Image: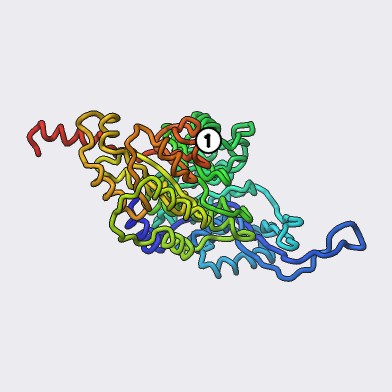
Amino acid sequence: MTEGYIDNFLNDALPKLRIAVVGDIMVDRYVFGSVDRISPEAPVPVNKVNRISSVLGGAANVAANLANLDCRVYLAGLVGDDENAALLRGLLDDAGIDGTGMVVRKGHVTTTKVRVLGSRQQMVRLDFEDAVPFEREEEDALAAWLDQRIAQGLDGMILSDYKKGVLTDRMSQLVIERARRAGIPILVDPKGSDWHKYNGADFVTPNIKELGDCCGEKIPNEGQAVVDAARRLHEQYDFAHIMVTRSEKGITVIRKDGKVWNNPATAQEVFDVSGAGDTVAAAFLAAVASHLSIRTSLQVANAAAGIVVTKVGTYPIHRSELLKLWQEWHPNRWAPYKALSWEETAEKIRQWQKQGETVVFTNGCFDILHRGHVLYLQQAAMLGQHLVVGLNSDASVRRLKGETRPLVHEEDRAVLLSALGCVDEVVMFTEDTPAELLSVLRPDILVKGGDYKAEEVVGREYVKRVEIISFEEGYSTTGLVQKIASLAKEGKL
């Protein structure tokens, strides 16, 4: 995804999106205090309360994230007629969320979670809830509301399931069927061990524990184990994509046909993961509804999650924060290309590392620079503050690709790469692999494109970690060369 598309998404597309959220609505309350003594009444700490705050939780937190991204949001679910329901409505009004889809049940307890924190450490959580299934008339009322909303226009839908009763088998299928009929992308945040009620969803987004719950076994948070588990579930259920949120290891998307996307986490410091899954769901669906690619949508979701986990408590992402992050990550670069030696590049890397900045390295021939190259380099650059590209020399390319390659001279290829805003430095190497170059540069992260396993990547011993990024489908230099040759043979050039 090019810079222009990202700018358009953040500045123009988000405020125009209309997204419905259906699921288990909650209120999250936080009691903040300080602890400096033990109670004389019982061996428990005494928390001196300083302040109490209330925020939207559960499906309402998904809606809050979308609203703070400046989307137009419509929320549906079940609430009671109690004091917490009144508090909830006030919070929805403050956030600008349309809550006309909420079904009110007399005598029902509006789900509320109270977290007591002493010196920013959570001490206890108090849950007020009445987890009972939707009744048939309530399902019909919500379905009628949804039909009206779809008729008035929707760009996306999210099902947020916390197993509190709203998303029964029938209700889930009603919503998914209507979304598919209207051609609206639908994302599900699942719960439980049986996901048949989510069949037909475009995206199902379990965390690593929820993935294991559905598989009936604990799944290690390792790349291949996650992919294998998701592929087993694809055989059992009817989803287009399974998107696994993996905490500090980022997000992995596995499509039904087996294609895999990985996007490592961006947060440098994790303080509180409360609500991070809701943020991922909201940001990702907003990006998909704006017709961004899955790869770019993952970058948006990971960037949003990286912001909220540094906050205390349930915190919805704001569009201004994403804009600021994008502007900081993508400064304007107008300096002309100047070739540096390996040693000069290594010195530059050391200076960045001394400042606590992460240096990413990738390599390739980059003969006839195309969109697939740019998307790959942009995703690599998002893993750190600086991207260094190792470029195969002409002699190296000939050995790897044949005597007719490269089509573009090494210096011209270097100039084109260095002109990309996501690339900080381009350095040439004449060997068949970048192993010797890496032994000198020693960056922090080595990125490889394709279906490699990290333990098989050449030069991995010279970096802190290896990341694998799949190439964008439909783009390759070889394909372009073959097309040009075919057109020339047909006399069409």
Q: Colour scheme used in the picture?
A: rainbow
Q: Residue at x 37, y 46 (%)?
A: 377
Q: Which residue is label 1 attached to?
A: 223
Q: Residue furthest right?
A: 40
Q: Residues within 10 Å of mark 1 (few under 14, many from 20)?
A: some
Q: Amino acid at mark 1?
A: Gly
Q: Quadrant of residue 336?
A: bottom left
Question: Residue 379, can we see it?
Answer: no
Residue 162 higher or lower than 69, as above or below: above
Q: How many marks?
A: 1
Is 56 on the left or on the right of 51, as rendered? left
Most foreground residue, 265 or 82: 265
Image coordinates of residue 442 in percent, x first then y, are 47, 43
Where does the C terminus fall, quadrant-wise?
Answer: top left
Residue 337 higher or lower than 220, as above or below: below
Is 201 on the left or on the right of 90, as rendered? left
Q: Residue at x 59, y 40 (%)?
A: 208
Q: Secondary structure at mark 1?
A: helix
Image coordinates of residue 319 in percent, x first then y, are 46, 63
Q: Quadrant of residue 475?
A: top left
Residue 299 higher or lower than 55, as above or below: above
Image coordinates of residue 253 in percent, x first then y, are 47, 40
Q: Residue furthest left?
A: 491
Most foreground residue, 49 or 237: 49
Question: Residue 356, can we see it?
Answer: yes
